[in-house]
Image (cartoon, coloured by chain):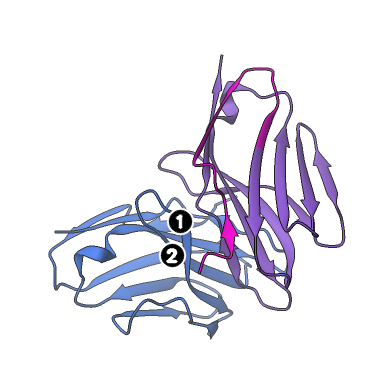
Chain colours: A blue, B purple
Amino acid sequence: GAGVSQSPSNKVTEKGKDVELRCDPISGHTALYWYRQRLGQGLEFLIYFQGNSAPDKSGLPSDRFSAERTGESVSTLTIQRTQQEDSAVYLCASSTQRYEQYFGPGTRLTVT
Amino acid sequence: DQQVKQNSPSLSVQEGRISILNCDYTNSMFDYFLWYKKYPAEGPTFLISISSIKDKNEDGRFTVFLNKSAKHLSLHIVPSQPGDSAVYFCAARVGNFNKFYFGSGTKLNVKP
């Protein structure tokens, strides 16, 4: 079946512009996660959705970051007024009741 | 605040030998631990997991060991194969919360 998909796969943007990253989870997966991976570092938790509510937003680095989820479907991560330190691979994952998360291929964001 | 640490950024092993990847954690509230494998330009894929009430879980060539008193987790791959060459992440979950903490990863190179 289809896995988690993310778009775009690559995004180059100028400093100060807004970007929107999209995640399509596996159908039926109630939980959805966003992570960030900077070059040479591990996965940094950003936000977690259960259905369309976000019980844990503690990982969002600043108020420039926001995320939404429509029902138990697509999610968007928005970064406003991008900064160079936002450059990273943004990974989305979804899961059911079990603990294993299924990851998408990621969106590589480069802020110039 | 790195609650899950992988202190070896890389590991090189000969094909057929054992690969041992290590992970240390600080939070005694972690109740579930997972290992993920990541190939370049792909998202991490789930490999194996272990509950905190167990000390060993085996799946084919992969075995995860948990030493709660030492707050230490290890992944053994026997025998190692060139296709196992990837970055391995350990992750841990806090009980009752669907938030996962990831280590920074260990890059395994299995030489033919």
Q: Nearer the viewer, residue A79 or B23?
A: B23
Instruction: Please report the bounds of the magenta region as a residue range.
Output: B1-20
Query: What kind of element bears circle 1?
Result: strand
Which tag, 1 or 2, sits closer to the chain's start?
A: 1
Q: Nearer the viewer, residue B26 or A15?
A: B26
Q: Are dots 1 and 2 in contact, CB under 8 Å?
A: yes
Give amino acid for label 1.
Ser
Q: In the image, residue A58 lies at what x, y percent? A: 48, 81
Residue A21 left/right relative to B60: left
Q: Quadrant of the C terminus of chain A?
A: bottom left
Q: Is residue A92 magenta?
A: no
**A7 shown above or below A68:** above
Q: Which residue is mark 2?
A: A23
Q: In the image, residue A95 lies at what x, y percent? A: 63, 64
Give me the residue at 60% from left, 50% from top.
A1
Give amino acid for label 2.
Cys
How many other residues sit within 10 Å of disc 1, few (<14), some (14-19) or many (≥20)?
Answer: many
Marker disc for residue B53 = none
Q: In the image, residue B19 lies at what x, y percent? A: 66, 30
Give me the residue at 79% from left, 33% from top.
B60
Question: Disc 1 to disc 2, how far (Cα)?
Answer: 6 Å
Query: What kind of element bears circle 2?
Result: strand
Q: Nearer the viewer, residue B50 or A96?
A: B50
Most extreme residue toward the right is B54
Q: Is residue B15 magenta?
A: yes
Q: Which residue is mark 1?
A: A5
**Chain letter of disc 1 in the image:** A
